[in-house]
Image (cartoon, coloured by chain):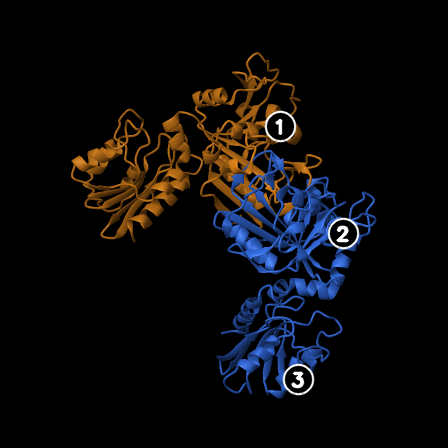
Chain colours: A orange, B blue
Amino acid sequence: MSDKNFMNMCLDLAQRAWGNVSPNPYVGSVIVKDGEIISSGYHRGPGLAHAELDAINNAKVSVKGSTLYCNLEPCCHTNKRTPPCAQRIVKEGIKRVVICNLDPNPHVAGKGVQILKDAGIEVETGILKEKGLVLNEVFFKHIQEESPFVHLKWAQTLDGKIAAKDSTSKWITSDRSRALVHRERISHDAILVGASTLRVDNPSLTAREDGNVVKRIKRIVVASKDDFDHDLKFFSDDYKDDSILALPEGQTSNSDVETIFCKTTAHGKVDLNDLLAKLYEKEIYSIYVEGGQGILTQFLKQKLFDRVSVFMAPKIVGEGASPLGYIGINSMKEALCLENPKVELLGDNIYITSRGSKCSLD
Amino acid sequence: MSDKNFMNMCLDLAQRAWGNVSPNPYVGSVIVKDGEIISSGYHRGPGLAHAELDAINNAKVSVKGSTLYCNLEPCCHTNKRTPPCAQRIVKEGIKRVVICNLDPNPHVAGKGVQILKDAGIEVETGILKEKGLVLNEVFFKHIQEESPFVHLKWAQTLDGKIAAKDSTSKWITSDRSRALVHRERISHDAILVGASTLRVDNPSLTAREDGNVVKRIKRIVVASKDDFDHDLKFFSDDYKDDSILALPEGQTSNSDVETIFCKTTAHGKVDLNDLLAKLYEKEIYSIYVEGGQGILTQFLKQKLFDRVSVFMAPKIVGEGASPLGYIGINSMKEALCLENPKVELLGDNIYITSRGSKCSLD
């Protein structure tokens, strides 16, 4: 077993806490002694043990002289609910530490490593770095840029339609694709849709497994004014406390769901930059934008996205609604090229996801 | 090695004649004796030896007592340029014959097998039947239905656009995708496009490898009238003898390329059913329809297609041209579902192909 194998285990372990760690990162840890795994652990969520400590605490034999694998640099700061890991690793007499990513906070990055090195521990960093960055892309984004991670997602037919001529969209994709959508919802702090989607689809906007809500997440609707039927689920169901209506300043809300008023664009719409700043203040660190065309177009046109995911079903409808409108691109040469898209087959559906490259738009 | 393994070899061998066999089928043959392959062969094209004969002729040792694998039932009729294979197999003392598909002509199907059985040869049929049907889908279609095989193809961005706002479409897909397009062109008797594609793109519509034309195939343009600039490549380049202009009856052609006049629809357009019948009479047995939106829409709406292929690049353009217009589908429930789509990754491009199911349209 190589360092990479053990680091892959850490990344897998980390994901056992899927959807539970925000605003923290996903972290897993494996402890190896004489080539054998003697313990492992992962971070289960805010206020709970860090992965390294979980692994140390889980060990049934002494970890002295062992190698500890961990996909994030052990912490060294003490101004939080959990004790610092680097100091504990030193105290336990661990001989070698292998790390995937350094702490993304530039004021902290490397300090945990320094404590380990000063204690004579051999430290390696950067093992499976890219994979770790993807796993914790939400964490890295909100820590480094102090803005929510924005994930744009839509489901389309093979011929690129998100709805048929009569605006129906149920269901484009398969059960299996929709199960993955819910798994992605779980991993975000909020779902966001535009006013038309709310009006036409009356969506639940909850994170479900087998039809049951498995996690409370915020659901945000962006609108120019509140002229909605307040019998819509968003305003009236059991989860209405999770609803946030975003309106331009000067508008009024007639419903009793939480409403935030944002700066207004020249077109009388919610300014998305201001919305993201206000959501960040509310500790919403990641947003899953699920359409429709209007809101996806605004996020794309303003380059406010960190990931784009498309679920595609092998269906053809011809005339219908496109996922996007005008995003500032006029010619094929200017097309936005997604870098290193990951393609996954979900039965006969296709899932394409990419960290949004903005190169061609710049 | 199982019968399936040897049959897979036959199917692979058959494809060595890619693009050269029309109107014949792709056929490969392997001869096995005491578990060892003692010979193999394939059909190279019209007028040349059938695969079974090619394999028998290639054998360096006696084929007596051997097993012959062949993906199509050996022929038994004598009204053609090549001698009947079934009789030859009997004469050679071959002990067992394994076949993928029976002759698609219902008047002939099974007769070759009967000759073999009557001579005491053990015969097995249907091995990798589905794979054989796909390989020879063009042959099966034109023999059984006496109409050309129609293959609809388009290239699109991830968001389902075949051109950007300014109508540019060069290039949506990668070199690798476009190389596969040319390989598909080679396997058809003709390429077909609509009038707008001719006008806007001035395409070469030739089958090329590394930029060089490797096979002469017919190129068909369907138009309502001949108001083209005759300097377009279609009318003027070195391959203009391959050009066929299809116009409604009553129109006139001012160019010197071959023109066929077809029945007219209520909208003053070429009646595609009549066009296909006329092309079949001209021994055009397969057509690769490459767009644009208008012509693809007509073929789809009239259910005149046998395969649909989409090349997709991980690009986003927003507003632009969709692959299809109104095809008679109004609601998502009515969507045309493609059966068993095959998905292939071509670098970062995605190729999706399916024998067009027409179920949902019926």
Residue identifier under label 2: B272
Task: Say if labels 2 and 3 share a chain.
Answer: yes
Residue A257 located left or right of residue A355: right
Q: Are marks 2 and 3 in contact (CB under 8 Å)?
A: no
Residue A76 located left or right of residue B261: left
Q: Which residue shows up at 56% across the image and 56% down it? A: B208
Residue A116 coordinates in the image, percent (x, y): 20, 36
How many discs mark residues in the rendered view? 3
Residue B240 coordinates in the image, percent (x, y): 66, 54
Front residue (pair B232, B98): B232
Residue A3 coordinates in the image, percent (x, y): 29, 48
Amino acid type of the residue tagged 3 in the rendering: Gln
Q: Neighbour class for label 3 at 10 Å: few (<14), some, many (≥20)?
A: some
Give the SS element for disc 1. Answer: helix
Q: Neighbour class for label 1 at 10 Å: few (<14), some, many (≥20)?
A: many
Question: Which badge, 2 or 3, comes first in the chain's sequence?
Answer: 3
Residue B214 coordinates in the image, percent (x, y): 56, 60
Amino acid type of the residue tagged 1 in the rendering: Leu
Amino acid type of the residue tagged 2 in the rendering: Leu
Q: Neighbour class for label 2 at 10 Å: few (<14), some, many (≥20)?
A: many
Numbered disc in front, either 2 or 1: 2
Q: Mark 3 lies on which chain?
A: B
Mark 2 to mark 1 CA distance (whole Å): 42 Å
Residue identifier under label 1: A198
Q: Which chain carries label 2?
A: B
Q: Which residue shows up at 49% across the image and 41% down it? A: A353
Q: Mark 1 lies on which chain?
A: A
Residue identifier under label 3: B87
Mark 3 to mark 1 CA distance (whole Å): 72 Å
Give the SS element for disc 3. Answer: helix
